[in-house]
Amino acid sequence: MYTIDLTGKTGLVMGVANQRSLAWAIAQPLVQAGARLAYSYQGERLLPALEKLTAGQDTFLVPCDVTNDDDLDALFETVEARYGRLDYLVHALAFAPQVTFDRPFVEVARDDWRTAMDVSAYSLVAATRRAAPLMRDGGSIVTLSYLAAERVVPHYNMMGVAKAALEASVRYLAYDLGPQGIRVNALSAGPARTIAARSISGFGEMYGEAGRASMLKRNIETDEVGGLGFALLAGQLGGGVTGATIYVDAGFHAIGMFLPDRAE
Ligand code: NAD
């Protein structure tokens, strides 16, 4: 059997809010394979749930609002003090003001644009810049994107634009850090019922439609995102992949036309 032992490897996971979070789905197989993971969380409100989820793990939890440079500095200083190095970074967080989902894209306000770009795209650059010096033996970074980066998905609006910037940032970061053996990739996940998804007007309807129209005729499971995340992070499997956006969406992205009468 092909086994992967990540004993001695360390990672930082940013973006676990609860057990449905895609960040949590990616963390699971890493922990099961023996990696030690630290988690960052946005604010004190999220701490009790994270403490409960991670009880029993050899871990530590650090607050970090990614719009705050001092928080980011303190986070990576703590990781360096505790681990001395880093192998994996999971960046699974995003935010856009509610009004950007509710109103047409053409109305997006400058401040709302800035906020969405800052949290959802720039934060990857800011975290990667601080993680890279700790990845002394190379490393792997994974972020989460969505098809709205490249196609219009109703209501995603500003978040789609921010995801486009995120995917472009993945390519430039991968180029910069490739010589250091650091890989950077995005997973473009199909819809999943998480807290973040609740902000999106009409998400329930879109979730149903994506399940019906995808090639596999179903929605994805979050552990399928976790599985591919694991493959990209654990170098034995994903060692040759960098600068990529890989879809975990039951084939939805590749369909050019949806026929309602396709055999069920
Ligand atoms: P989630 O609500 O579980 O996670 C979102 C996380 O973002 C939360 O932990 C939240 O605290 C964090 N966050 C927001 N603003 C922050 C800030 N300023 N500082 C620090 N953290 C902040 O939802 P999720 O669906 O697991 O989202 C994870 C990633 O997956 C996001 O990038 C999201 O866009 C992406 N994604 C989600 C779906 C989906 O359908 N759920 C599909 C594709 C991609």
Image (cartoon, rainbow, N blue to C red):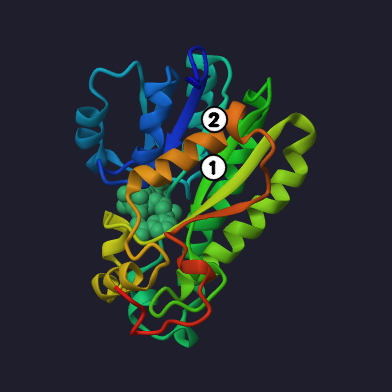
Residue visible at 27% across and 26% down?
Answer: 54
Tag shown at residue 142: 1
Query: Would you place residue 191 above or below residue 50 in this image?
Result: below
Q: Amino acid at mark 1?
A: Val
First in residue order: circle 2 vs circle 1: 2
Circle 2 sits on which residue? 88
Residue nearest the observer in this picture, 70 or 169: 169
- The quadrant of the picture occupied by the C terminus is bottom left
Tell whether 113 sits left or right of 176.
left
- Circle 1 packing at 10 Å, graded few (<14), some (14-19), many (20+), is many
Name the element at disc 1.
strand
Residue visible at 31% across and 73% down?
Answer: 206
Q: Position of residue 230 (x, y in %)?
A: 48, 34
Q: Is residue 94 visible?
A: no
Kindly indicate whether the residue at mark 1 contacts the one at mark 2 (C-beta within 8 angstroms). yes
Tell whether 113 sits left or right of 198.
right
Mark 2–mark 1 distance (CA, rounded to whole Å): 8 Å
- Circle 2 packing at 10 Å, graded few (<14), some (14-19), many (20+), is many
Query: Would you place residue 16 above or below residue 100 in this image?
Result: above
Residue nearest the observer in this picture, 18 or 68: 18
Residue nearest the observer in this picture, 242 or 249: 249
Q: Position of residue 161 (x, y in %)?
A: 54, 70
Tell whether 205 sits left or right of 145.
left
Q: Position of residue 158 (x, y in %)?
A: 47, 72
